[in-house]
Amino acid sequence: MELANIEKLLEKYLDAETTIAEEKQLKSYFLSDNVAPHLQEYQSMFGYFSTNKNERFTKTIQLKSQKVNWKWLSVAASVVLLVSVYTGYQNNQQKKAEKIYQETQMAFGMLAANLNKGNVAIAQLQYFENTKNKVFKQPKN
């Protein structure tokens, strides 16, 4: 093989423009013993390609499968459900307590109004009692 031709093929190879037939020519040239001294650095590269072409990986690859842990998901859903029910129950209890408080205030207001009517009546009776004591001149107790 002519050295100029090999250099052109090597240039095309480094630019990734060679055909398979041209790559075979380069491989056969660099695997032979008569390689030009300035091209000997490429001889190890082509030698590596030819020896590693037959290597095979024989170990099995263990892939970790990511299983969804449904047990924890169901526990989390249960906790969320219980918290929401409890919060709703507390909110309902608070609304009932506020309603009872308002009804009690209304009842106390009605009771106070009736007691005030009684106070007016007692004030009239006191006035009558004072007048009676003045008329009959009874001593005050």
Image: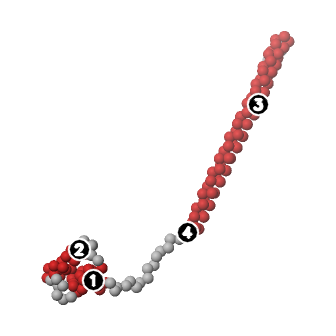
What element does badge 2 sit on?
helix
Tell me which numbered mark, 4 or 3, is placed earlier along the sequence.
Answer: 4
Instruction: Name, please, the residue furthest toward the bottom.
Output: 33
- Camera-nearest residue between 20 and 134: 20
> Distance of mark 4 from mark 2, alpha carbons?
55 Å
Labels 1 and 3 touching (C-beta < 8 A): no
Along the viewing direction, whichever of 25 and 64 lies nearer the viewer:
25
> Are circles 1 and 2 on residues that touch, CB within 8 Å?
no
**Could you tell me which quadrant the C terminus lies in?**
top right
Task: Find residue 24 and name its label.
Answer: 1
- Locate residue 67 relative to residue 59 in the image: left or right: right
Q: Is residue 134 above or below residue 13?
A: above
Q: Position of residue 76 (x, y in %)?
A: 58, 61
SS type, badge 1: helix
- Tell me what residue is drawn at x 59 percent, y 68 percent: 71
Image x and y of residue 59, in percent: 41, 84
Residue count near mark 1 (Cα–Cα under 10 Å), binned few <14, some 14–19, many ≥20: few
User: Mark 4 = which residue?
Assistant: 69
SS at circle 4: loop
The Cα atoms of the two marked residues, 3 and 2, are separated by: 109 Å
Please give the residue where the numbered disc 2 appears in the rendered image: 12
Q: Nearer the viewer, mark 3 or mark 2?
A: 2
Dot 2 amino acid type: Lys
